Amino acid sequence: MLQNKRLVSLFCLVMIIALALSACGGGNNAANNEKNKNDNGAAENTPAPAPPAEGPKYNFRLAETHPADYPTTKGDMKFAELVKEKSDGRITIDVFPSAQLGEEKSAIEQVQLGAIEFTRVSSSPLGEFNKEFGVFSLPYIFDNDEHVWKFLLGDAGMKLLDSLESSRLKGLGYYTSGSRNFYSEKPLKSLEDLKGLKIRVQENQLNIAMIDALGANATPMPYGEVYSALQTGVIDGAENNYPSYFSSKHYEVAKNYILDGHQRVPEVLMMSKTAWDKLSPEDQAIIKEAALESITFQREEWAKYEKLSEEQVRAAGATITEVTDVTPWQEAVKPVIDANRQQYKTILDAIDAAR
Ligand code: BDP
């Protein structure tokens, strides 16, 4: 009797250990969980369809600030589509537009922690997490879009993207964002008109210095709060490119737009370094390739939407002022460039060389 009891206990112990071992082996990442589900599913419902491809399955999330029809979101979706195609359906990425997963600063933090796997953000808030990216907040450093892209796609631009690794982020590619201009409900015909206005800026210290140098007062705040801040008079104005000015409807509450083109701040598509490190080299290559391939599509979408935005805001009655001579603006912000030249010397030299 005693002997039997001992045997039963021993059997139970062996079973518990076996169960514990199998749980450890299969449960340490989402991909394995997913794989186990399929294995179980296949055993229950025979005949099972053949799995689409060998290798682990992943379902990732991508945080995006803009709405679904905005060119960056379209770029994200193209990227997701290419990843799915290249992985034969093994890797899927769900794009969450309209800041559903949080405003950009919070999205970056969540991606650093690995709570969200991907995000597309502006270089400006990114500059608070990785100093190098602050360079894009320096005003008037690029001549035009061609100049920006010559730099971004060159060695220095790609090295800059790689530098994100030190901030627990994996830079995948850049998207375009045109040039940024000031707007206000108050008349904006010249640099003089900007004096004393309270202007919302992206959350980056260099923007505050730039606004000070232009004689206005900077109010950093998340993008999603700008419309009501303009409406209630908490701020007098803001600054952004045509597509954002249009899609955010800021033109409804700030109808004067002055085309000084002070910044060209690239958009960055990136992944959590933690999530990246868990991928096989083959899957990493799929993600990197898809990101780079989606750039051309995003730039084409941008060109169309930029044109449409300009037409729409003009049709809605916005007053657009061209700046024929940008020299006084550039002179006003020169102290900001001078104060930061040393810190950004290598990148600024590369930007100059791409001219
Ligand atoms: C837009 C960028 C977006 C930023 C926004 C801003 O595409 O990522 O959040 O500007 O001003 O141009 O915060």
Image (spheres, rainbow, N blue to C red):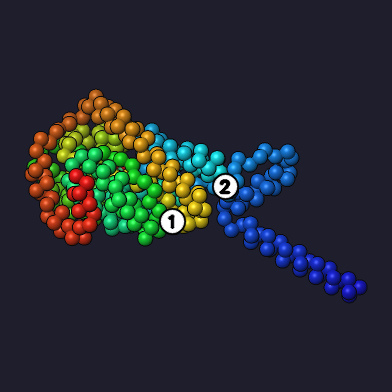
Marking on residue 273? 1
Residue ID at (41%, 43%): 291
Q: Which quadrant: the N terminus? A: bottom right
Residue 112 placement, left or right of 20: left
Ligand 1 quarter of the rendering: top left
Q: Secondary structure at mark 1?
A: helix
Q: CA distance from mark 2 to mark 1?
A: 18 Å
Q: Is residue 33 left or right of residue 191?
A: right
Question: In percent of the image, x 39 and y 48: which residue is there?
Answer: 172
Which amino acid type is shown beneath numbered disc 2? Lys
Residue 345, image x, y percentages: 20, 58
> On the image, which quarter does residue 313 sit in?
top left
Q: Can residue 302 be seen?
A: yes
The residue indicated by pointer 2 is: 57
The image shows residue 301 at horizontal and vertical percentages of: 34, 32
Mark 1 Cβ inside 8 Å of ligand 1: no
Task: Decide if residue 215 is in sight here.
Answer: no
Q: Position of residue 114 (x, y in %)?
A: 46, 55
